[in-house]
Image (spheres, rainbow, N blue to C red):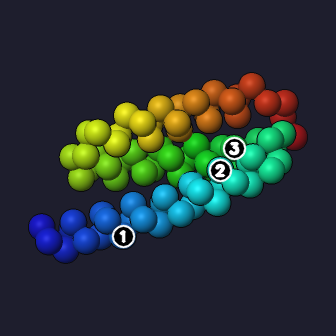
Amino acid sequence: ARGEATALRTSLAALERSSEIFRNASAKFPSNAMLRRNHAVAESNAADILFAMKSEDGTLTVADKGIANAQITKALPAP
């Protein structure tokens, strides 16, 4: 259990960094659907990790951000 908790924390930290990178990139290039999608995927994966960690306080916030980004991505024109 201890090893699993460490792995989850490490994964969450990496996903939060990934999300930050894609959030900044998609803010700089708001019409780039690939960047917005990748940001949504990182947020969704972070929500999965938080759920696995039973951290319900953060799960909804992260999941809601991922859902919002996915909806924005769908609204953008295809490249």
* 53 versus 37 height, above or below: below
Measure how far apart labels 3 and 1 are at the Cα level.
23 Å
Residues under numbered marks 1 and 2 in contact, where contact means CB atoms less than 8 Å apart: no
Does residue 34 appear in the picture of this structure?
A: no
Where residue 43 sits: x, y (%)?
A: 50, 47
For disc 2, the marked residue is 23
Q: How many labels does the image show?
A: 3
Q: Is residue 50 left or right of residue 26?
A: left
Residues under numbered marks 3 and 1 in contact, where contact means CB atoms less than 8 Å apart: no
Q: Quadrant of the C terminus?
A: top right
Measure how far apart labels 3 and 2 are at the Cα level.
7 Å
Q: Quadrant of the N terminus?
A: bottom left
Q: Is residue 22 left or right of residue 46?
A: right
For disc 3, the marked residue is 36
Where residue 72 sits: x, y (%)?
A: 69, 30
Work out whether residue 62 or residue 70 is closer to the camera in this orientation and state it: 62
Residues under numbered marks 3 and 2 in contact, where contact means CB atoms less than 8 Å apart: no
Q: In this view, does 17 lie to the left or right of 8?
A: right
For disc 1, the marked residue is 10
Between disc 3 and disc 2, whose residue precedes? 2
Identify the residue at image location x=84%, y=34%: 78
Q: What residue type is labelled 2?
A: Arg
Label 3 or label 2, whichever lies nearer to me, is: 2
Label 1 or label 2, whichever lies nearer to me, is: 2
| SS category of the residue bearing label 2 | helix
Between disc 3 and disc 1, whose residue precedes? 1
Work out whether residue 75 or residue 22 is closer to the camera in this orientation and state it: 22
